[in-house]
Image: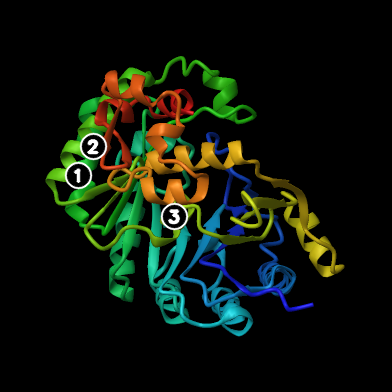
């Protein structure tokens, strides 16, 4: 019996679930750091052990194209911990990741820490500004100020970072269209390479859900959010940013390689508490996800047990739905007709029942065999995707 060939993995995601304090709108797998401090050495060791186990079990080859540390607040970790983790990736699957990103909260950053991250090999920074208004930050329950954010950004440049992204949220409590436009202009003045914009979501189980409910009572609302997105597109495109994905804008050449591999359906390993992994083989693909609790995750790994608490095999219908949902998110790339036909046996225009009606309504357009969402469709993207499938 021959050996199974090694499959190439394109991305590694490591979830760091610890925060200074959990924000009231956040539904991500995160929690306030324990009073005794973050068990960073233990946690990083577990990430490294899990990586080794997954590589061996899945017979994967590297090196990965991207590494991404998300959270939570990865910037609570020391540069030494980050360096140890990146070195373990080099040893386990090979050195050569071209994009290594760490998410950061402004008030966890100092110049020496940023210099340490840069020296460890991190070459891309994503800073959670979230708002350029003090009242906005207070309403979101953030632990930093606008001044803190701007100072952290300056330190990042000083430390050597040439690829910095900032995150902003719109549709937040008390926000106006004028205030949002002013925030966008301030963001442009900083000249980050990447800007991510996220509409305010109210997730069940969060303090914001209890306060505002599923109907977003007291918030700007969907119509105002649509206006805010259109303003953002105008302002950022006018400043030279490419709107390459629904929520993401980048100066040419600075698009997020890691997130793009998700949208293109490439394989990735998710490490850490609550992290998801995806492999597009065999058949229509499969994914698994880890225990959400950091302590349970570490206990399982240390006992040489599989930290995954669930998994699923995708059906052909699942795979088509994901190809549609993810493809439509990519503004310029869209749903690639040839790739779709190669995987599913037919071009998307012929395979997707809702296509003609959505084109007639001005929500989709077709170029060759590729399908793209229009600006009108972009404002109701989830609805478009569901009707298309």
First-in-chain label (3 vs 1): 1
Tags 1 and 2 in contact by the CB under 8 Å rule? yes
Point out residue 236 in the picture as x, y percentages from the top left corner: 19, 44
Q: Secondary structure at mark 2?
A: helix
136 to 5, vertically: above or below: above
Instruction: Out of 348 and 192, give the one closest to the viewer.
Output: 348
Point out residue 219 in the picture as x, y percentages from the top left corner: 41, 20
Q: Which residue is disc 1 drawn over?
A: 236
First-in-chain label (2 vs 3): 2
Tags 2 and 3 in contact by the CB under 8 Å rule? no
Q: Which residue is disc 3 drawn over?
A: 259
Query: In the displayed structure, does residue 314 sit left or right of residue 83?
Result: right
- The image quarter in which residue 294 lies: bottom right
Q: Secondary structure at mark 3?
A: helix
Q: Which mark is residue 351?
A: none
Point out residue 85 in the picture as x, y percentages from the top left corner: 59, 75
Q: Which mark is residue 232?
A: 2
Q: CA distance from mark 1 to mark 2?
A: 6 Å
168 to 192, vertically: above or below: above
Disc 2: CA contacts within 10 A as few (<14), some (14-19) or many (>=20): many
């Amino acid at each position: 019996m021959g050996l199974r060939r090694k499959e190439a993995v394109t991305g590694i995601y490591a979830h760091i679930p610890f925060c200074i304090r959990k924000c009231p709108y956040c539904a991500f797998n995160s929690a306030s750091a324990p009073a005794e401090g973050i068990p960073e050495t233990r946690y990083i060791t577990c990430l490294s052990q899990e990586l080794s186990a997954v590589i061996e079990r899945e017979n994967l080859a590297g090196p990965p194209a991207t590494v991404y540390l998300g959270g939570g607040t990865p910037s609570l970790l020391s540069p030494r911990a980050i360096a140890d983790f990146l070195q373990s990736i080099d040893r386990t699957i090979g050195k050569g990741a071209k994009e290594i990103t760490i998410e950061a909260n402004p008030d966890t950053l100092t110049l020496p820490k940023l210099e340490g991250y840069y020296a460890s090999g991190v070459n891309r920074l994503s800073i959670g500004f979230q708002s350029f208004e003090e009242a906005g930050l207070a309403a979101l329950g953030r632990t930093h100020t606008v001044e803190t954010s701007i100072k952290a950004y300056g330190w990042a440049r000083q430390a050597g970072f040439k690829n910095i992204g900032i995150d902003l949220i719109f549709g937040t409590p008390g926000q106006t269209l004028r205030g949002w436009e002013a925030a966008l202009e301030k963001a442009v003045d900083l000249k980050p390479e990447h800007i991510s914009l996220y509409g305010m979501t109210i997730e069940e189980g969060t303090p914001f859900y209890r306060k505002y409910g599923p109907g977003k009572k007291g918030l700007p609302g969907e119509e105002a959010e649509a206006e805010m997105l259109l303003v953002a597109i105008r302002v950022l495109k006018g400043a030279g940013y490419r709107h390459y994905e629904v929520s993401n804008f980048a100066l040419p050449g600075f698009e997020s390689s890691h997130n793009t591999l998700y949208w293109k359906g490439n394989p990735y390993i998710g490490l850490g508490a609550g992290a998801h992994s995806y492999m597009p083989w065999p058949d229509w693909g499969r994914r698994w996800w880890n225990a959400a609790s950091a302590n349970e995750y570490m206990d399982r790994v240390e006992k040489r047990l599989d930290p995954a608490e669930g998994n699923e095999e995708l059906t052909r219908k699942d795979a088509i739905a994901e190809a549609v949902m993810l493809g439509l998110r990519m503004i310029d790339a869209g749903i690639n007709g040839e790739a779709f036909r190669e995987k599913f046996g037919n071009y998307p225009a012929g395979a997707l029942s809702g296509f003609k009606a959505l084109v007639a309504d001005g929500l989709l357009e077709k170029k060759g065999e590729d399908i793209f969402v229009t600006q009108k469709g972009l404002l109701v993207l989830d609805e478009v995707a569901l009707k298309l499938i």
